[in-house]
Image (spheres, rainbow, N blue to C red):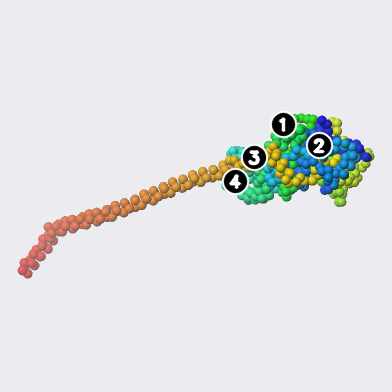
Amino acid sequence: MDSRIFIGGGGESYSKKQYLTLKYANRHGLISGATGTGKTVTLQILAEEFSAAGVPVFLSDVKGDLSGLAAPGNANSKLHQAFSDRAKIIGYETYKYAGFPVTFWDLLGQQGHPVRTTVSEMGPLLLARLLELSEAQEGILNIAFRLADEQGLPLLDLKDLQSLLVWVGENRIDLALRYGNISVSSIGAIQRRLLIIENQGGSELFGEPALELIDIMHVDPSGHGQINILAADKLMKSPRLYATFLLWLLSELFEELPEVGDLDKPKLVFFFDEAHLLFDDAPKALVNKVEQVARLIRSKGVGVYFVTQNPDDIPEDILGQLGNRVQHALRAFTARDRKALRLAAETYRENPRFDTEVAIREVGVGEALTSMLIKKGVPGIVERTLIRPPSSQLGPLESAWREKLINASHLAGKYEQHHDRRSAYEILKERAVKAANSAADIEEKEDDMETAQREFSTARRYSGSRVSRSSSRSMRSRADDSFGEAMGKMVMKELSGTTGRRIVRGLLGGLFKGR
């Protein structure tokens, strides 16, 4: 098998064949050019060539056109004659129509197998980027992830993260002693952002079963690499969700795949279409992360190809790592456009036959300037190249055919059913129920104690009042008796004395006298 893939014909008469060496395909690449200049067709023919060479491919179908890779081109189409003529011009003698093994994926689960990841796998950095959080809000998100790890709370889907943030808010005073101030308003802002992402379809992204990387690195029995197509035409309504997912997938490849060194061909080629979405307003930490991945992932056997309108969309440190380049026409209407065009031209190894800057403005549709890495990884001289015609169908696949391929896929049924195992949401809910039951038990015991105390107090008051009344009567009786006795004694004493005898004599004398 050839160690190169065919790109097109270069030179003055387009007779000089241009190749991309498979050994250097993991040194990454760039496909750029203005809208309508042929970037999509270039992406399509590269996917075909890599697949034919036994290299799996992952790409996103932003316009809905690339699903045609699954079907052979049509000899009755209007473009058939133009493709045949182009093949003759560039000396493509083996040109024929053919379809390629395709697996369809869709974050929304509508036009392909559902593709998911978990909140934990996404991580706080990418999630903060997805939610457009401030520095303070990102700090709280990091606290939540740390607590999830420490307390064994799996973060699988959005409701897991939402419930954990509620718990963090309820315990913010205790947590502040360890992690610093936790603002309720910041937690509320994160919750609102999560709600927005959920409404945009983000809830479909997070959950299980999560994507297994081996399922996008399949080679079929005929030796063709599988072409994985992510349906992104509807997903582009949420561009930040789209860019974050692709960056997550790239990061997972970097983290999970083993070091393999220099291979004869890549283990996977990853096309990042609409790459400017990744870098628009991206924080420095995220750009550094992408740069690190781009620099090191080639040792994992993965080639990354950015597709964008202008090379200026890619940060300079990352652009310098993209060795294989296809530059379609650029327009220069403003001073900024002219500056970007000039800078793009300066990144190529000059060809003495033409002015690169002028050529970038002049190349027609289906034509491009190409520069591929050659021996020892040195950039080749830039060439004006006529891109070879595609072998597969140009344009979208019929819906019925797509559905048939999805159902017949070796992955059919693996990801369709969503699994919701016990995770942070369920664990925190169980804790809350247990705490509520404990509180109810304590409250019931307190009520019982209060009732017993009231009954005891009532009994004491009743018993005390009876004792008081009885004591009072006894005391009064004793007092009366004592008073009577005292008076009797006093009277007897007086009567026995001189005064007493006088009173008695007076009384008796009066009685007898009257009688």
**Cα–Cα span, label 2 and label 1:** 25 Å
Q: Earlier in the sequence, mark 3 or mark 1?
A: 3
Q: In the image, 321: left or right of 88?
A: left
Identity of the amino acid at label 2? Glu
- Residue 289 in sight from this viewpoint: no
Q: For the view shown, which residue lies furthest in the front direction?
A: 76
Query: What residue is shown with label 4?
Result: 163
Give coordinates of residue 400: x percent, y percent. Answer: 72, 45
**Cα–Cα span, label 1 and label 4:** 35 Å
Q: Earlier in the sequence, mark 3 or mark 4?
A: 4
Query: What residue is shown with label 2?
Result: 49
Residue displayed at 54% across by 43% down: 430
Q: Earlier in the sequence, mark 2 or mark 1?
A: 2
Instruction: Pick the quarter of the image with the N terminus.
Output: top right
Do labels 1 and 4 touch, CB within 8 Å? Answer: no
Q: Give the quarter of the image for residue 480.
A: bottom left
Give coordinates of residue 160: x percent, y percent. Answer: 61, 44
